[in-house]
Amino acid sequence: MSPNEIATYVIDYVHRKEKSVTPMKLQKLLFYIKAWGLVAGVDVIPSAFRKWAFGPVNPNVYKKYKKYGSGAIPTPDYVHPPYDDERAIIDFVLSSYAQFSAVELSNMTHSEDPWKKAEANGRPAAGDPDIREPFPGTFHAKWIRRAPACS
């Protein structure tokens, strides 16, 4: 699935829980889906996230939803269901993280190693560095032992 297809699933999921999702919150939820997927050995979102001021951003998803600014994104008309292995990871992340606000999620990402190490990967601080894939066996892996099984 493309990042934008996963984004529509995320938006629909959050709306079904009677919550709203802003573009900023969407970005952080997608980042955690990527992180936990890599920990589980599944690259759910096979595209890069960039280090922006308020946290990780997938540029393609940003382009699609930036028009909503800090407002809520409406429920999508169509949602492509994820594959079973992806859905287990996505639903695990959403049940764990969708309760947090966009600002809380942003603060969480800023406190974690993948974010902190992005500029240590040889990119200039003033640039727009990729957040590398240091997840398997590192930061998020220590949490997977505490989490319920994804399947």
Image (tube, rainbow, N blue to C red):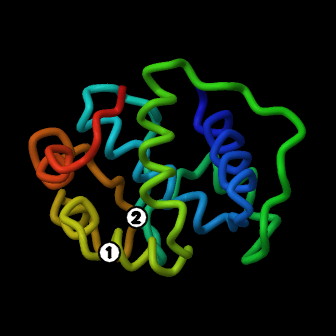
Identify the residue at image location x=43%, y=43%: 92
Question: In the image, is residue 68 above or below residue 92?
Answer: below
**Could you say which quadrant of the image residue 129 lies in?**
bottom left
Of the 4 image quadrants, the one containing the C terminus is top left
Instruction: Measure the C-alpha gap from mark 2 to mark 1.
Output: 10 Å
In the displayed structure, would residue 38 be above or below residue 17?
above
- Where's residue 133, x and y in %? 25, 43
Pointer 1 residue: 110
Q: Earlier in the sequence, mark 2 or mark 1?
A: 2
* Amino acid on which the number 2 mark rests in the picture: Lys
Q: Dot 2 lies on which element?
A: strand
Q: Secondary structure at mark 1?
A: helix
In the image shown, does 127 or 20 lie closer to the viewer? 20
The residue that mark 2 highlights is: 51
- Residue 68 versus residue 104: which sits nearer the camera? 104
The answer to whether residue 38 is left or right of residue 52 is left
Crowdedness near tag 2: few (<14), some (14–19) or many (≥20) residues, C-alpha within 10 Å: many
Q: Residue at x 78, y 74 (%)?
A: 71
Residue under the image location 20 percent in, 51 percent down: 140
Select label 2 or label 1 by which is in front. Answer: 1
Observer-nearest residue: 114 or 35?
35
Give the percent coordinates (x, y) of residue 5: 67, 33
Q: Position of residue 47 (x, y in %)?
A: 46, 37
| Residue 135 horizontal/vertical position (percent) | 21, 45
Kindly indicate whether the residue at mark 1 contacts the one at mark 2 (C-beta within 8 angstroms). Answer: no
Disc number placed over residue 39 in the picture, else none: none
Q: Nearer the viewer, residue 141 or 129?
A: 141
Identify the residue at horizontal 58%, vertical 66% (top origin): 25
Give the amino acid type for the residue marked by disc 1 in the picture.
His
